[in-house]
Image: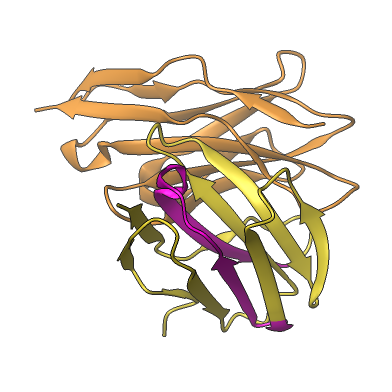
Chain colours: A orange, B yellow
Amino acid sequence: AQSVAQPEDQVNVAEGNPLTVKCTYSVSGNPYLFWYVQYPNRGLQFLLKYITGDNLVKGSYGFEAEFNKSQTSFHLKKPSALVSDSALYFCAVRERYGNNRLAFGKGNQVVVIP
Amino acid sequence: DTAVSQTPKYLVTQMGNDKSIKCEQNLGHDTMYWYKQDSKKFLKIMFSYNNKELIINETVPNRFSPKSPDKAHLNLHINSLELGDSAVYFCASSQGQREGYTFGSGTRLTVV
């Protein structure tokens, strides 16, 4: 069964500095990978996905993620963090062939310090 | 237009009561889901329906019963509510393997 590990509980970063949120996955075969963001008292919002092709994927709000098959990772990055990026970030993985189940990581709280 | 809408947004009820949460999506998606987010923010899948057919039924107490009258609606009925049922319940929908989920805004259930 597919699974996701987000090793850090909280990521603190100063405003304007680069932001990285780590994600590793386990899945049979090639994965479909997703990042979501959750603001307080809101539902999850889609940020970006990797399906196939270029390993560097660009998404909403200036975020990007790099698929690394050898390291089974899909880290989320932003070159310059904003205070408004403070939120909970979830990585998710799905098998290419099977049911539509998305397995989510435990989430990472990102705190951007002004 | 809200893509995935859940009602109610907040639900406070006493132990032992029965309650329902409704979900509707206007995206034309074939698959709908219920997820539970606990106090530690963990997201756990509960059920999934594809075109009104139950395809995922995780280890959930049988007090929880989903119902899908058509592919645009997936409701969740909970009998004999317990304190441990307090959580945020999210409805979501998707279409195909390549697309992610579209989530509703959640229903915060508090059992007192």
Outermost residue to the front: B16
Q: Is residue B52 above or below residue B76?
A: below
Image coords of residue B70 (percent x, y): 72, 86
User: Total number of numbered labels?
Assistant: 0
Q: Is residue B46 above or below residue B76?
A: above
Image coords of residue A34 (percent x, y): 60, 43
* Between B8 and B93, the one nearer to me in the picture: B8
* Between B35 and B1, the one nearer to me in the picture: B35
Q: Quadrant of the N terminus of chain A?
A: top right
Residue A2 belongs to the span the image colors magenta: no
Image coords of residue A16 (percent x, y): 19, 27
Image coords of residue A51 (percent x, y): 73, 45
The residue that appears at 52% across and 49% down in the rendered structure is B36
Indicate left or right for A82 with B46 as reference: left
Outermost residue to the left: A114
Q: Quadrant of the C terminus of chain A?
A: top left
Classify residue B98 by image quadrant. Answer: bottom right
Residue B73 belongs to the span the image colors magenta: yes
* Between B81 and B105, the one nearer to me in the picture: B81
The residue that appears at 69% across and 55% down in the rendered structure is B62
Residue A78 shows in the view: no
The residue that appears at 50% across and 20% down in the rendered structure is A22
* Between B2 and B49, the one nearer to me in the picture: B49
Tell me where the magenta segment starts and ends, as one range. Answer: B69-95
Classify residue B72 by image quadrant. Answer: bottom right
The residue that appears at 30% across and 48% down in the rendered structure is A39
